[in-house]
Image (cartoon, coloured by chain):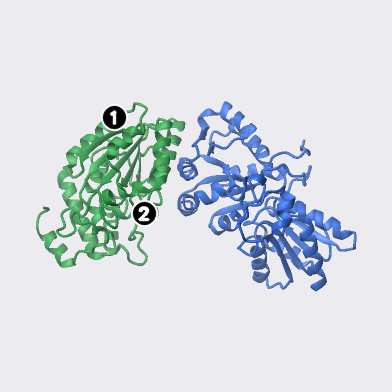
Chain colours: A blue, B green
């Protein structure tokens, strides 16, 4: 039975890890002093294959690499900006570089995509990870928009060798998928159809995209909304087909705008496929801010809230 | 090759490796010579002294002891050792740094016998700690050795691993420090002193020995003692060494890391016996 009540992405994934640890003795869980209720079950039931390295993300990655070399399927778990940026060179050298010559199966689970740690400020928020992790060859970058997708990603990560970075929201997001699981091989889902533009969004911004689409629909504007959850391994032909089917493209991401994120990957896809489409990139204005507010307020300030996004979408559609 | 006591003359082998390392430098002066001369006795003890179990024909043999060569560029002396042991044909030594060769200026894990990526310093100990933990969980009896330089220990990730290994009682892990006391730009003590390294490691809960790193029999004896000891503490050997050993002008010179001795000098050294 699929659970339709919103849950934390991390709990959906960790539950699947826990359920599989008894049968799969190669699963290993490494945390950098970062918890979750489900984690306590892993720690309690499988103490030999759970380890907390402490507040030490460089060592989190290095130890995970060593365990992977010994044949373990490793899940490494920490707050998103720390598991990516604090230890970026460890990710590059001991995962991306090393995995080109040694088989490794390592999944980095980063919690706290975008502004999801609302009041913690920019150290705990994460607007750079899509760009940084997509830059590393060998890494799958997976950015689910609900806990159902997050749970399904377990099989994808444990079942396939290689490196993965899971970009999880820290808040419980509304459920998008019910009995019909997302197509993990395709890497994206057309959530709703429309003829005026394709909106391609990832993570939390999928929900913003749906809000904007619903609002402009009152005026007869029809936006197709795509949940792009695989930011590196999506089916490029299929996605290009979806972009070709509509005259305009709008991207939405909770990451810096124009800095190599979803906007860039879509423009690159258009260019590679020889498609020309007017594009609008909705992303975080590239600057660090210390203002406090709820997530919706912060989003409006940085240019990605539903109100400012709708205004920009309407202007774009008028112009193009 | 099983770990079964010493059946080669380690002193003679160390001298041979020293000469072979100079030969590699003659042909490929791009390699780091000085820092590749200081750890010779360490590697000779490990690879010829019966301390490591390995099989050159099966580099991923599960039962092998793992040797992580963290001081990548300062391990060119491993090229002749690996060739001699049969990891690859000795003719490969003629092509170091040439297009198409797998033997580069800094060793990469495409070289049979190298386990991990090491050109960037301070990575080996953490990865080795993960391997040591993994072996314990699998119930394996294998040892994990890591060879680092002393300057490399400036990298903070080492100290994360030093705490981790003690906390998790990784007594199948042995750190060997090629303590040549020189970084790229001068003496370690004048740049970022490690103090009495053995005391510091001891303070972190490690079982640490110190030795004259050029007395190959002493290095071998200390490593043998450490290998036999499994008392819940990770182990370390601080081997006091001389950077650029045996090469006049290079030996213990503060800038030896970036110095390139003239080939004439190398030729004349190769005609003499080792100093």
Q: Give left or right: position of B16 versus A122.
A: left
Q: Give left or right: position of B106 versus A191.
A: left
Does residue B61 show up?
no
Pinpoint the chain carrying mark 1: B
Q: Nearest the camera: B94 or B132? A: B132
Pinpoint the chain carrying mark 2: B
Q: Position of residue B148 (x, y in %)?
A: 32, 46
Q: Is residue A104 above or below residue A197?
A: above
Q: What crowding class fits label 1: few (fewer than 14 Cα within 10 Å), some (14-19), or many (20 or more)? A: few
Q: Is residue B233 above or below residue A211?
A: above
Q: Position of residue A310 (x, y in %)?
A: 80, 60
Q: Tell which circle, 1 or 2, labels the residue nearer the N-terminal end.
A: 2
Both labels 1 and 2 in a single chain:
yes
Query: Which residue, given by chain and number where applicable, does mark 1 sit on?
Result: B228
Q: Nearest the camera: B112 or A13? A: A13
Q: Quadrant of the C terminus of chain A?
A: bottom right
Q: What crowding class fits label 2: few (fewer than 14 Cα within 10 Å), some (14-19), or many (20 or more)? A: some
Q: Position of residue A314 (x, y in %)?
A: 82, 65
Which residue is at 62% across, 35% downward? A36
Which residue is at 50% across, 29% downward? A48
Which residue is at 73% across, 48% downward? A182
Query: Which residue, given by chain and number where applicable, does mark 2 sit on?
Result: B111
Q: Quadrant of the N terminus of chain A?
A: top right
Q: Nearer the viewer, mark 1 or mark 2?
A: 1
Q: Position of residue A145 (x, y in %)?
A: 71, 49
Q: Nearest the camera: B64 or A250? A: A250
């Amino acid at each position: 039975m699929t659970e339709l009540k919103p849950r934390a992405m991390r709990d959906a994934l960790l539950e699947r890890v826990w359920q599989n640890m008894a049968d799969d003795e190669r699963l290993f869980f490494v945390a950098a002093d970062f918890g979750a209720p489900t984690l306590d079950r892993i720690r309690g039931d499988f103490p030999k294959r759970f380890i907390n390295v402490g507040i030490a993300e460089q060592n989190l990655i290095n130890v995970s690499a060593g365990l992977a070399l010994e044949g373990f399927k490793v899940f490494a778990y920490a707050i998103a900006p720390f598991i990516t940026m604090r230890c970026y060179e460890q990710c590059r050298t001991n995962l991306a570089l090393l995995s080109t010559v040694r088989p490794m199966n390592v999944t980095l689970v980063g919690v706290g995509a975008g502004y999801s740690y609302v009041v913690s400020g920019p150290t705990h928020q994460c607007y750079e990870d899509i760009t940084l992790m997509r830059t590393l060859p060998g890494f799958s970058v997976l950015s689910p928009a609900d806990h159902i997708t997050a749970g399904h990603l377990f099989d994808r990560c444990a079942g396939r060798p290689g490196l993965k970075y899971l970009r999880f929201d820290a808040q419980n997001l509304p459920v998008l998928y019910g009995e019909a699981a997302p197509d993990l091989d395709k890497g994206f889902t057309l959530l709703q159809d429309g003829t005026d533009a394709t909106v391609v969004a990832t993570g939390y911004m999928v929900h913003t995209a749906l809000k904007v689409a619903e609002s402009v629909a009152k005026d007869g504007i029809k936006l197709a909304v795509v949940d792009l959850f695989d930011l590196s391994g999506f089916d490029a032909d299929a996605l290009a087909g979806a972009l070709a089917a509509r005259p305009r493209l709008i991207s939405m991401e909770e990451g810096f705008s124009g800095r190599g994120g979803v906007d860039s990957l879509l423009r690159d896809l258009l260019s590679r496929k020889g498609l020309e489409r007017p594009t609008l990139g909705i992303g975080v204005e590239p600057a660090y801010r210390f203002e406090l507010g709820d997530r919706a307020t912060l989003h409006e300030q940085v240019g990605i809230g539903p109100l400012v996004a709708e205004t920009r979408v309407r202007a774009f559609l008028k112009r193009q | 090759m099983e770990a079964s006591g010493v059946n080669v003359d380690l002193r003679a082998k160390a001298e041979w490796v020293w000469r072979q390392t100079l030969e590699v430098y003659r042909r490929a002066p791009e390699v780091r010579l000085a820092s590749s001369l200081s750890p010779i006795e360490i590697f000779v003890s490990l690879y010829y002294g019966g301390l490591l179990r390995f099989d050159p024909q099966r580099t991923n043999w599960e039962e092998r002891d793992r040797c992580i060569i963290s001081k990548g560029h300062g391990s060119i002396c491993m090229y002749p050792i690996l060739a001699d042991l049969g990891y690859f044909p000795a003719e490969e030594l003629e092509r170091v740094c040439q297009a198409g060769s797998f033997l580069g200026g800094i060793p990469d894990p495409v070289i049979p016998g190298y386990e991990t990526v090491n050109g960037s310093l301070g990575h080996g100990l953490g990865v080795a700690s993960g391997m040591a933990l993994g072996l314990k969980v699998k119930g394996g009896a294998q040892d994990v050795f890591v060879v680092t330089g002393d300057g490399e220990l400036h990298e903070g990730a080492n100290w994360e691993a030093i705490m981790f290994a003690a906390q998790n009682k990784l007594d199948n892990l042995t750190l060997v420090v090629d303590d040549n006391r020189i970084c790229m730009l001068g003496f370690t003590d004048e740049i970022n002193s490690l103090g009495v390294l053995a005391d510091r490691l001891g303070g972190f809960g490690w079982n640490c020995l110190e030795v004259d790193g050029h007395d190959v029999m002493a290095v071998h004896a200390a490593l043998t003692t450490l290998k036999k000891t499994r008392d819940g503490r990770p182990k370390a050997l601080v081997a006091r060494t001389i950077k650029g050993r045996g090469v006049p002008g290079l030996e213990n010179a503060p800038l030896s890391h970036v110095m390139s001795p003239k080939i004439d000098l190398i030729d004349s050294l190769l005609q003499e016996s080792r100093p």
